[in-house]
Image (spheres, coloured by chain):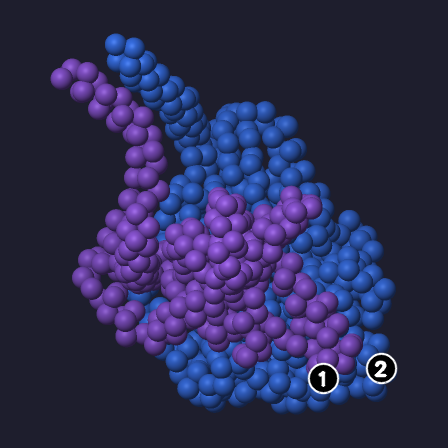
Chain colours: A purple, B blue
């Protein structure tokens, strides 16, 4: 009895620092956001009061919220699709490479290693409508009749950001999938080859089942990260022009730090949290189903 | 048993760590006490000859990102610390855009400095948030009669001076003399002339004018204010409501939209102040609107263009319109209410105004920063500066504009509404919705006006 209690105490002592960190970094902000979302909290006004669900009603009646929500969904789906496709393809290609694999892997991971600020400012410079290397090159080569305005053309700006995000995120997907690919026993492929399986059949019946859980978890994690992505969009366009690249995190930021309505901003973040909980809930249901099938 | 002992050991270690933390807090508490004692002693000694030795640490946030100002202020702080060995001054630099975010969020979290620079629009918001301490005694020590009443008035409420003007500048129209001469164009004096000149000077390599409307900055508001103020109007009504749907404001919005479409790089829809300035520094723009800071910018980036730039008053709607005054910025220093060492902060502010230091500070961005106190402009030392001599005519143009203008929205006196007008990017977003989103001017202006009024009401 005493030994059991002692073990429990030891466990708790070891877990306590992590619990404190989680409490400070996660639980407190979430509950304070819930609290502020029910008040008239303003960034520079000292006093505020409880106003119930007025902030939620305001946000849900604001057409800009739905524009931001749609942009967030588009941003996540397009970025994630691009990252998975390119990351997956690069991993498959790299898996087959024998010589200089380490060098290729290092080179391909470079975009992921850069801080967002460096990436944003570099791309901002490369694609600048006046001095930018790319618009000027395309124009000088006669491929465009005028210098493309990647960050101000309504038809280009969103996809430009998606492209940058794909370029940034694909290496991370690649490395993870490559690790999963390397765990697949080679003899399974050899047995399939002996049985007369074609390459695509090996891919569908051996490769995919082995890596789908890893890919699934990557999709869950990347969905949360990409959906909540703030820095790249903020640094490149600030959500503009004309809200064309305003996603929910940018919308929440502009509401809290632009127009200073912290209560409304908190309401947006809580709605964002609920939305992501639903999405990840669906994801995990699917992954659990896969795990059951596997076991 | 081993596990039990290790558990006990961990608990003991954690206890020691926590004790360490509390021990580390003690000196801070002591220093707080000593500061209170110093303050008390100071209060008791008011009027006596005895000088208390200053002791403590203050933080100074400033926005001197351009020119050599940072070095001059650091040098002043080092000298002040040498003279007061028990004083430590920590200097942190933020761009204006970052500074606004920094102090507004800092108010909520308690992470604010002892002293800082501010924009006039910030000051009224800071006063409204009860974040500042009056500086009447500092103004008196420097010499109240040295400050222009209007300048001092920008940070004054109920007889309390919450800010001390440090330097002044005004927005004027900068132009490339060489380009105008080549095209045989006179310096424009009306907006129609300006439009014609800008269109005429737009080529594959040079833009007539860039129309900047990036969010997170006040450039769109500034440009609209140029037009509206030049016609004697204001972006605020007399009862401090947003005024974006007046005929004058609608004309102004349409005017800049037209110039954006015909003479501006399309990326300028995202431009902030430095993007805009850089375009002029790179020789890519025939006209620009800015203060005397452009001289330093050109000198650092394209010194070969230095002889080709000049400035003139901002155009009017009609040539015979009266001079209404456009935009003047008197950049002040403020003292934050939370400071533990107001006596150090005040002493350091006064120290910056010592003539030698003050002139050296102004000369770190010659022409860009004009003196906010009397008696400097005509001093021999100040006039010795080569750049000031070279741009004497431009200094006169800017000085005249300084005397006539106000901060954006201050036409009806300092107000929180004026601060909010320029700090929320609502007007910039309005421009973007028109220029890129295709929303019609009247609808966009009405929406922006409603948004501004809602934010004004929040502050009541």
Q: Disc 1: which chain?
A: A
Direction front: furthest residue: A195
Residue B425, image x, y percentages = 47, 69
Q: Which residue is mark 1?
A: A145
Q: In the image, what residue occupies the spot 50% across and 27% down?
A: B55
User: Circle 1 sits in a helix, a strand or a loop, which is it?
Assistant: loop
As drawn, is B228 to the left or to the right of B13? Answer: right
Dot 2: within a 10 Å radius of its alpha carbon, few (fewer than 14), some, or many (20 or more) residues? few
Q: In the image, what residue occupies the spot 83% across and 86% down?
A: B183
Q: Is residue B134 visible?
A: yes
Residue B76, image x, y percentages = 65, 38
In this rendering, the answer to whether B436 lies above or below B375 is below
Q: In the image, what residue occupies the spot 84% across and 82% down?
A: B181
Residue B309, image x, y percentages = 79, 70
Cα distance in 3D space between marks 1 and 2: 30 Å
User: Circle 2 sits in a helix, a strand or a loop, which is it?
Assistant: helix
Q: Disc 2: which chain?
A: B
Q: Nearer the viewer, residue B410 or B99?
A: B99
Name the quadrant containing residue B129.
bottom left
Q: Which residue is mark 2?
A: B181
- Image quarter (top left, top right, bottom left or bottom right) of the N terminus of chain A: top left
Name the quadrant containing residue B174.
bottom right
Q: Tell me, yes or no, whether the two marked residues, 1 and 2, touch with CB atoms within 8 Å.
A: no
Q: In the image, what residue occupies the spot 56% across and 55% down?
A: A92
Q: Nearer the viewer, residue B186 or A188?
A: A188
Which label sits on residue B145?
Answer: none
Q: Nearer the viewer, residue A46 or B346?
A: A46
Judged by depth in the image, the label closer to the viewer, 1 or 2, is 1
Dot 1: within a 10 Å radius of its alpha carbon, few (fewer than 14), some, or many (20 or more) residues? few
């Amino acid at each position: 009895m005493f030994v059991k209690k002692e073990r429990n105490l030891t466990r708790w002592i070891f877990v306590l620092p992590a619990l404190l960190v989680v409490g400070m970094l996660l639980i407190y902000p979430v509950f304070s956001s819930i609290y502020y979302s029910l008040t008239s909290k303003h960034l520079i006004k000292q006093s505020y009061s409880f106003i119930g669900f007025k902030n939620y009603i305001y946000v849900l009646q604001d057409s800009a919220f739905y524009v931001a929500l749609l942009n967030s969904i588009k941003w996540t789906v397009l970025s994630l699709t691009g990252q998975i496709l390119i990351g997956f393809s690069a991993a498959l290609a790299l898996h087959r490479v024998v010589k200089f694999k380490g060098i290729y892997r290092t080179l391909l991971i470079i975009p992921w290693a850069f801080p967002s600020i460096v990436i944003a400012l570099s791309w901002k410079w490369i694609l600048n409508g006046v001095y930018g290397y790319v618009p000027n090159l395309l124009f000088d080569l006669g491929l465009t009749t005028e210098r493309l305005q990647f960050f101000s053309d309504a038809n280009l700006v969103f996809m430009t950001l998606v492209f940058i995000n794909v370029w940034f995120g694909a290496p991370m997907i690649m490395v993870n999938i490559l690790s999963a690919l390397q765990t697949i026993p080679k003899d399974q492929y050899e047995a399939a080859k002996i049985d007369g399986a074609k390459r695509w059949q090996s891919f569908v019946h051996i490769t995919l089942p082995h890596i789908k859980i890893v890919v699934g978890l990557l999709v869950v994690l990347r969905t949360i990260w990409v959906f909540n992505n703030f820095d790249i969009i903020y640094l490149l366009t600030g959500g503009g022009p004309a809200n064309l690249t305003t996603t929910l995190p940018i919308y929440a930021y502009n509401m809290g730090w632009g127009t200073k309505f912290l209560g409304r901003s908190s309401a947006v973040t809580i709605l964002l949290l609920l939305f992501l909980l639903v999405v990840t809930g669906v994801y995990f249901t699917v992954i659990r189903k896969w795990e059951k099938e596997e076991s | 048993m081993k596990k039990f002992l290790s558990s006990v050991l961990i608990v003991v270690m954690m206890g020691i760590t926590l004790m360490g933390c509390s021990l580390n807090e003690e000196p801070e508490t002591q220093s707080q006490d000593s500061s209170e004692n110093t303050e008390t002693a100071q209060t008791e000694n008011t009027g006596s000859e005895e000088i208390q030795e200053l002791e403590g640490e203050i933080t100074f946030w400033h926005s001197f990102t351009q020119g050599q100002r940072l070095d001059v202020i650091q040098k002043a702080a080092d000298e002040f610390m040498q003279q007061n060995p028990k004083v430590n001054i920590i200097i942190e630099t933020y761009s204006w855009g970052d500074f606004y975010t920094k102090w507004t969020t800092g108010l909520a979290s308690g992470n604010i400095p002892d002293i800082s620079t501010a924009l006039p629009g910030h000051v009224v918001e800071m006063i409204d948030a009860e974040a500042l301490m009056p500086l009447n005694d500092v103004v008196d020590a420097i010499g109240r009669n040295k400050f222009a009443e209007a300048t001092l008035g920008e940070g004054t409420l109920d007889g309390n001076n919450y800010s001390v003007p440090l330097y002044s500048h005004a927005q004027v129209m900068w132009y490339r003399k060489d380009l105008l001469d080549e095209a045989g164009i006179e310096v424009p004096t009306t907006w129609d002339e300006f439009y014609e000149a800008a269109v005429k000077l737009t080529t594959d390599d040079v833009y007539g004018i860039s129309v900047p409307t990036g969010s997170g900055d006040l450039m769109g508001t500034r440009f609209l204010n140029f037009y509206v103020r030049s016609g004697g109007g204001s972006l605020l009504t007399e009862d401090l409501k947003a005024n974006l749907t007046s005929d004058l404001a609608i004309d102004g919005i349409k005017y800049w939209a037209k110039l954006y479409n015909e003479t501006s790089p399309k990326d300028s829809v995202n431009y902030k102040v430095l993007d805009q300035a850089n375009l002029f520094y790179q020789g890519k723009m025939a006209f620009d609107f800015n203060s005397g800071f452009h001289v330093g910018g050109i000198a650092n980036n394209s010194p070969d263009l230095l002889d080709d730039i000049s400035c003139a008053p901002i155009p009017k709607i009609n040539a015979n319109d009266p001079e209404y005054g456009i935009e003047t910025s008197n950049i002040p220093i403020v003292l934050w209410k939370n400071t533990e060492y107001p006596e150090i902060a005040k002493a350091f502010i006064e120290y910056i105004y010592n003539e030698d230091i003050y002139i050296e500070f102004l000369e770190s961005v010659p022409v860009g920063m004009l003196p906010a106190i009397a008696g400097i402009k005509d001093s021999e030392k100040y006039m010795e500066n080569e750049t000031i001599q070279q741009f004497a005519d431009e200094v006169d143009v800017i000085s005249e504009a300084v005397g006539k203008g106000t901060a954006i929205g201050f036409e009806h006196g300092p107000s929180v509404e004026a601060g909010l007008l320029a700090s929320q990017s609502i007007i910039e977003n309005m421009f973007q919705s028109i220029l890129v989103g295709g929303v019609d001017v009247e609808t966009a202006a009405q929406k922006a006006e409603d948004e501004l009024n809602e934010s004004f009401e929040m502050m009541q």
